[in-house]
Image (cartoon, rainbow, N blue to C red):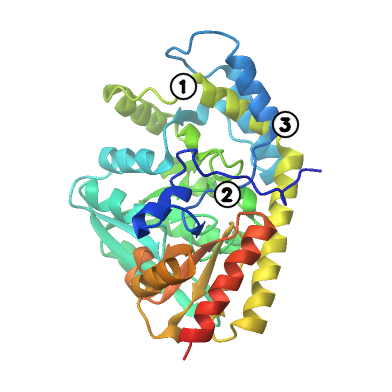
Amino acid sequence: MYDFDKVVDRRGTSSIKWNVQYDFGQKDGLLPFWIADTDFAAEPKILEAMKKRLDHPIIGYADPWENVFTAIQGWWERRHGWKAETDWMYISSGVVTAIYFNLQLLIPQGEKVLTFTPVYDPFFAAIKNSGHELVDCPMIHEDNYYTIDYAQFEEELKNGVRGVVFCNPHNPVGRVWSEEELKKIADLCAKYGAYLFSDEVHADYALTRPYTTMGKFEQIHDRLVVYTAISKSFNMAGMCSSCLIIPNGELKKKIVADFESRWMFGPCDLAFTAIEAAYTYGDTWMDEAAAYVAGNVEIVKKFMAERMPKVQVTKHEGTFLMWLDMNCYGLTSGGITDILAKEYGVALGDGSHYGGQAEGFMRFNIGCARETLMQGLEQLAKMYDKYAK
């Protein structure tokens, strides 16, 4: 059993999450529930493997070795039922960086790229900064639950969308897409010849139903890139690594050649070591981490129902990020952010960053010890008592 109740003090570790204090003029005391890393200590076997690597005194340029790829393959096959071939894989730096360059390579400048909103805000930057027209396809939001508007999606594909940047499971609304929903997206992308860029870094935090990868749908394999990482699953975002799974061999060659032409040779062998160890030894840790997060979800739902009943909690199926409708305050998301930080010492994610229809919403990172979570909830309740209408 791993001790996820242990509060790990991250102050003084150059943590972006915890250094947000300074953005609000504070030196200490602000509890951060915003950026998407957790406060869970890493699986010890991963750290042991990294320490062993450091027994050698040289950290030079490196290529991933075969066991790195077979570890990734084994994880996806035994946990998600998809055996991706190792020669489909390419280790790169972060997912958003990879999406940016893949868009730039595969879709001509000025063409349309779609994403379903509200969505992880770096998608907007990746699409626009790679020289493409962003097409916003708002999801249907009913009864605190989000679904895809397939009629609108197909209409946008008919109107010239050449690529789709997809989030599975979905950040920030917490959807774990069903196999039926994913098949519809894959079918439509295949029908209209659109590339599908599927960010699946939250795959291991599917909490209420089995997770399905886009990789299972062979009809889109010619135009599919699946992005994975140990960043969310094992709280190792600092390794700045990801794995691209590209079933189309010719497409993979193009992507690899593009990265190499930019002298982007991927992360260092400490990251490769961490990837191999995580996917080899991390099953029990991952199971317990996901169960702990699921328990945190129930605590938040119960607390909100009893203490903050006008705040609407989006039905949560996966990720360690909860999506809260706080429009009961009559404030913008930015206004809520400022008040929470400056008056109550709590930092949440400003919902308006995730799309225009998300004003008044906030993203709440619950990947932390229960003691920290309860401290944050009590502060949220204090604001509710004063500001809720």
Mark found first going from the N terminus, 2 or 3: 2
Of discs 2 and 3, which sits in the foreground?
Answer: 2
- In this picture, residue 364 sits left or right of residue 154: right
Q: Quadrant location of residue 298?
A: bottom right
- Residue at the farthest bottom position: 389
Q: Which residue is drawn at 43% across and 82% down?
A: 327
Q: Is residue 386 visible to the viewer in this orientation of the structure?
A: yes
Taking depth in this image into account, of 51 and 97 the one nearest to the observer is 51
- Residue at the farthest left position: 110
Q: Which residue is drawn at 51% across and 19% down?
A: 269
Say how many tags the image has: 3
Residue on which the image places disc 2 = 38
The residue under label 1 is which amino acid type? Cys
Q: Quadrant location of residue 49?
A: top right
* Mark 2 secondary-structure assignment: loop
Mark found first going from the N terminus, 2 or 1: 2
Taking depth in this image into account, of 147 and 292 the one nearest to the observer is 292
**Rendered location of residue 12, percent (x, y):** 49, 40
* Mark 1 secondary-structure assignment: loop
Mark found first going from the N terminus, 3 or 1: 1
Residue on which the image places disc 1 = 268
- In this picture, residue 11 sits left or right of residue 339: right
**Rendered location of residue 122, percent (x, y):** 35, 52
Q: Is residue 245 visible to the viewer in this orientation of the structure?
A: no
Residue on which the image places disc 3 = 281
The residue under label 2 is which amino acid type? Thr
